[in-house]
Each structure stands twice: as structure tokens, then as C-alpha cells.
Amino acid sequence: MTEMKALRSPDGTPYAPATLAVTAGRPHGQNQPVNSPITLTSTFHHAGTAQPGDSVYARFSNPSWDPLEATLAALEGAELPGLVYGSGMAAIAAALSLVPDGGTVIAPRACYNTTLTLMQQQEAKGRVRLVLLDVSDSDAVLAALAASPAPALFWLESPTNPLLEVADVPALLTAARAAGVTTVVDNTFATPLGMNPLALGADVVVHSMTKFLAGHSDVIMGGIVTDSPELRATLHGYRTVHGAISGGLDSYLALRGVRTLALRFERGCANAAVLAERLAADPRACNVRYPGLETDPGHARAAQHMRAFGAVLAFEPARAGQPSVERAEQVSASVALWTPATSLGGVESILERRRRHANEPLAVPEALVRLSVGIEDVEDLWRDLDRALGS
Ligand SMILES: Cc1ncc(COP(=O)(O)O)c(C=O)c1O
């Protein structure tokens, strides 16, 4: 493998996350390119029995993944390289496979809808027992952990998609570990710049790299990071056998996106904070959810264990002080600068009424609109939203 740039300065000082996003996984040394090349091959010249580290076939390993996997690990503070997958859901399916047949999965009652669909499908087949709860209710989670015989897996999303609920992440991960429960955190919303779940006690971190990491709505990819050699070997084996791999071009695009993560995320968070404040003061909006708002139920917790409040918020468009589905639909139909679309984490601002999706959890209010705030000028964003909300 190519030598890569060091993750700390020559005097030994570890680089900050914003520096790692730029420098991790970069080739180092005389005559090396500044960016790792894309390797477009399905197989490798290889005779004889494979030795560890050999390249044999591009579903097993691929040099196009290496710099991205190194960068993901560096950003999440892991020693072991990450693993990239063909989508966030491919990564989630791999992580969910860590619970053996007959085990229990404890998960948020409202989190990314397709994660829940996958869990519910496995429950319907009798593969797992599923316990869904409000992860911002620590007592409920602690009780479920205590009542779940091993083997069990605690699936955490925080802030949750799309309710932006904030769990007491360090306390719950510590309790799960003490109970011998494997923990997985979907860190897509917080990004590694906002939170590092491994440092807070998680066994496994998953990302939809489609979102903030890649950042330009031009690629679908997932990623996993763990510092357990056993879990990494299992996850690697799952990827090899199930084949949900990423192509070289997508891996290149995702890494190119990660290089600007710090700037994009900083601007997105700042814009989201301004919009959340304005919506919270606007009678055409109710139930604004953004952990950065001091009035938000998750604010104090988020301030304790997150470095940023994120670039996603949600609210319910209202008429006469009541949530209005009609007004929510009107917002989606009337925006000009915002894109009415699903997904999040790109440079462009996107919004949608989440319950338009048939598999959206019922805990999500009918009128709730989720906003993924991009890096445009915030006054342009507000003017467009203000106009779309109508009078
Ligand atoms: C929090 C979260 N996790 C996972 C996913 C799934 O990722 P992908 O669409 O890359 O498969 C999404 C997609 O919206 C998401 O929002």
C-alpha cells in the first residue's frame, strides 16, 4: 500500500479533525500524486495462494477504497481502517448482521425509516426480537438494556432522523457496554466533526456517506468504523460475501467531498442555527426541532457531548397555531431556491414533508418538514422559505 501522510505533526501533536479531513489518506513521498488514483479494475494479476494484504479480486479489496477508509477512520478517531460500502443501507445491513439469530435489537422508535424497515423485516422473519423506544428517554433505554438477555444490539441514532431527538449518548453507550450489549451508532447527522461515538463508548459507527461526508448529492455510499479487530473482520467478511461494494469513481468522489467537510459543515450548521431561530419566532411555524436552540429539549445534552448542533432541522408549518399538512405541502410546492427532495447533507438546501413516505414512522407528525441546510447565503434561504410559507 502507498505510504500516506502522517496524522500528526512532526512534533507529535495530533491534527485536528478539520486538518484530518484534508490530509488523512493522502499519498506521501517523492513523486507521489497529491490525490490517490482511481483503480478501475475488477481483478488483479495474482498467482498462487493469497497472503494477507494481497490484492486478488476487487470485491475483496480495492486500492480506490484505501484512502477513503483511512480518512474515515482518522475522522472517527479509530486505529483500524474503516470499511466503505455501496450505500448507507448496505453499511447498516452489515452492522445489523452483528446481532446473531434470536438476539434482541433495541432501537429508536423513530429513526431513518429504511433502517426501521430492515429491522422490522428481520423481526417478521423471526430473526431478531425488536424493542423500539424513545432514545431520548434514558430510563426507558436503561430498562430495555437490563431486560434484554444477550445477545443484544443497541442501535442508536442521535440526533434522530427526522425528529432531531438527542439521546444521552455517553451514558447509554456506557450502560450498554456494561450490560454486554453491542452498540452501533448511526453518526450520519452529527458527522465525525460533530461527534465521535467510538470515544463515547460505541463499538461500531455507521455513516450514510451519501450525506455530509460526500456532501454534493452525487454519490451513494456508506461507511463503517470500529476499533474491534473481531468486529471489523466480521464486517469485512460480510461485505465480501454480500458484495455491497462501492465503485472506484464513487469512492473518489466521496473522498473529494470529505476534503471540504469542515467548511461545508461549519456553514451548514451556522445557517441552520439562523433559520431555526427565525422559525421559532414565526407564527407560521410550530414545534421547531433543532438541538442548537436553547429551548430545544435536546439542547443541554447535545451541548455536553457534541461539538456542533448539525445542519438538519425540522418544523411543522402551522395555520392558526396548529400544525398544517396543507401548509407543509404548500412549502414543498412553492420553494424556488430550496430543492423539494429527499436526502440531506449536500451543499444545496433540501426540504421535504417526511410523512409523504409510506414507511415513515408514525411517531413523526404528519406536517413535519425536514430541512437539510446547505451552504448558500442564509438570507437567500430565509427569503425563499418566508415566501413559500405564505401569509
Ligand atoms: C440517518 C441515515 N442513515 C442512513 C441512511 C441510508 O443511507 P443511504 O441512502 O446512503 O443508503 C440515511 C438516508 O437518508 C439516513 O438519513
Image (cartoon, helix red, strand yellow):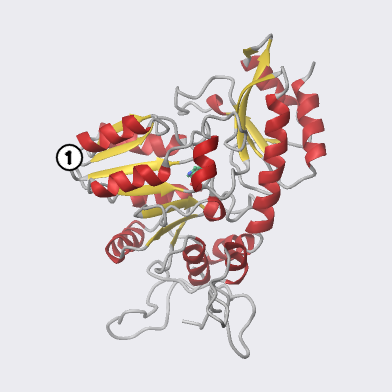
Against 166, is 37 above or below?
below
Q: Residues within 10 Å of mark 1 (few under 14, many from 20)?
A: few
Q: Amino acid at mark 1?
A: Pro
The image quarter containing residue 138 is top left
Residue 225 as seen in the image, left or right of residue 14: left
Q: Position of residue 178 (x, y in %)?
A: 25, 48
The image quarter containing residue 359 is top left
Is residue 157 visible in the rendered image? The answer is yes
Q: Position of residue 243 (x, y in %)?
A: 38, 58
What residue is at 48 percent from the left and 48 percent from the top? Answer: 187
Against 1, is 25 above or below?
above
Q: Position of residue 180 (x, y in %)?
A: 22, 49
Q: Look at the image and tell me in which quarter the C terminus lies.
A: top right
Against 66, is 364 above or below?
above
Q: Is mark 1 within 8 Å of ligand 1?
A: no
Q: Position of residue 172 (x, y in %)?
A: 35, 42
Per the image, the residue denoted by label 1 is 149
